[in-house]
Image: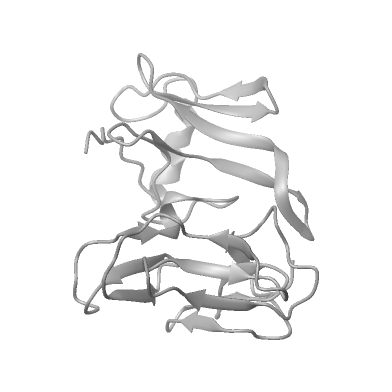
Amino acid sequence: LSPPVKSLSWVSSSQAIFQAGTWACIWYKNVQNSTVVWVANRDTPLSNPSGALLMTGEHGNIVLLDPSGNVTWSSNHTQVLRPNVLLLDIGNLVIKEGTENSPTFFWQSFDYPTHILLPDMKLGWKLSTGLNRYLTSWKSSEDPSTGDFSIKLDHHGFPEIFLWDKHVKNFRTGPWNGMIFSGVPENVCFKAWCQFQLRYETR
């Protein structure tokens, strides 16, 4: 998927861009081939890139409108009096209240991952709200619509990760033993370039 050619509106940081066209997506500026890392309206693309990406004043939500003014996607979660939209350098699109220095995110794209797990992004459940954060494949390299494959964390018993093909389990990591997923001991080699932490979110 190539970034939109015609810009409607955008939010930018020094490392990343959130921009709307047929799809509203985030990609990194300084990566070759402009790799797309998150797509907002992946299952509701605009028929043509002449809609509008807006921040609504009533509830502080980000909305994507089609050419007829119909909402095709919305963050649809916040009640913010003075919303401020920021795109962080790590690729996280956030809604804060008031100034950029506010530590609270009322909504963030990292809570709704698409096909890529980025640094500082979480995979799994937020037990207090029932939010389940998991990855789903694209239908093809040029179509970001939800594909057949997904990666989900099961928190029942000892947590472990499953790769699903629709409703069929294709792979399991084995339970987390405090350091690694026990069914994939070779994943210790990941320590050269990343670090996994398992945390229980109860609030």
Q: Is residue 154 above or below residue 85?
A: above
Look at the image and name its color scheme. one colour
Q: Quadrant of residue 160?
A: top left
Q: Give coordinates of residue 197: x percent, y percent.
A: 31, 40
Quarter of the picture holding the N terminus: bottom right
Decide if residue 17 is on the left or right side of residue 80.
right
Quarter of the picture holding the C terminus: top left
Decide if residue 145 is on the left or right side of residue 128.
right
Seen from the viewer's position, the closer of residues 84 and 151 is: 84
Decide if residue 69 is on the left or right side of residue 202.
right
Residue at left offset 51%, top offset 77%: 54
Q: Give coordinates of residue 175: x percent, y percent.
A: 41, 19
Seen from the viewer's position, the closer of residues 58 and 124 is: 58
Residue at the outermost top position: 157
Residue at left offset 72%, top offset 76%: 67
Q: Is residue 132 above or below residue 26?
A: above
Decide if residue 108 is on the left or right side of residue 201.
right
Residue 193 visible, this orientation = no
Q: Is residue 158 above or below residue 75?
A: above
Residue at left offset 40%, top offset 52%: 121
Q: Give coordinates of residue 68: x percent, y percent.
A: 72, 73
Seen from the viewer's position, the closer of residues 117 and 201 is: 201
Residue at left offset 72%, top offset 86%: 6
